[in-house]
Image: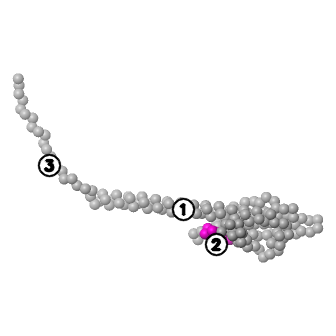
């Protein structure tokens, strides 16, 4: 039997001190966290602004269409009376009468311009162009929604959506 010399134990390293994070690591982590939270808040704020604008545009469309529908139900004598008035005619009362009044409609205006295209005479049907415009302001910008139609003594033709514009 052969005996070998005992194997010495592996060299032991001196015990490493357990340390926490350095101030630099904490500073970098904090900066990244602040940047992430700031970006999220910025995106949320922008999204809320877009949502408000979409809500205002939809509401203006509804008010504009409601005004046009009320005029569609009118008779030609009423349309002629409006056409003889100072233009454009103020239809702001429609907002309250059709239950559109809210914090969103404060400052919203509804104007209708009546333009006589053909005067009513014996043997000639009168024809009047109607343009309903709803206007509101958001963040310092003015927006409009318009719709146009022609009203004759036989009634209103289909109205045409004219879209919106930033004045």
Rendered location of residue 143, percent (x, y) = 64, 67
Q: Which residues are magenta?
A: 102-109
Rendered location of residue 92, percent (x, y) = 70, 72
Q: Which mark is residue 48?
A: 1
The residues bearing labels 1 and 2 have C-alpha atoms spaced at a distance of 20 Å
- The kind of secondary structure the magenta stretch mainly shows is loop
Magenta residue check for 108: yes
Element under label 2? loop
Q: Residue at x 75, y 73 (%)?
A: 89
Q: Name the residue beneath numbered marker 3.
A: 14
Snapshot quadrant of residue 103 = bottom right
Q: Earlier in the sequence, mark 2 or mark 3?
A: 3
Q: Which quadrant, please, contains the C terminus?
A: bottom right
Give the foreground label among 2 and 3: 2
Rendered location of residue 107, percent (x, y) = 64, 72
Q: Which mark is residue 107?
A: 2
Q: Is residue 5 above or below residue 165?
A: above
């Amino acid at each position: 039997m052969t005996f070998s010399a005992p194997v010495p134990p592996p060299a032991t390293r001196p015990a490493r001190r357990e340390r926490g994070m350095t101030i630099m690591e904490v500073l970098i982590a904090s900066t990244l966290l602040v940047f992430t939270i700031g970006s999220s808040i910025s995106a949320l704020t922008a999204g809320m602004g877009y949502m408000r604008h979409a809500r205002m545009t939809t509401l203006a469309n509804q008010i504009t269409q409601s005004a046009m529908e009320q005029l569609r139900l009118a008779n030609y004598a009423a349309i002629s009376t409006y056409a003889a008035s100072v233009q454009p005619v103020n239809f702001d009362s429609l907002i309250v009468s059709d239950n559109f009044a809210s914090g969103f409609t404060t400052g919203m205006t509804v104007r209708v311009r009546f333009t006589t295209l053909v005067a009513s005479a014996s043997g000639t049907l009168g024809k009047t162009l109607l343009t309903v415009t709803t206007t509101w302001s958001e963040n310092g910008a003015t927006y409009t929604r318009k719709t146009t139609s022609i009203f004759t003594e036989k009634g209103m033709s289909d109205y045409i959506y004219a879209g919106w514009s930033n004045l």
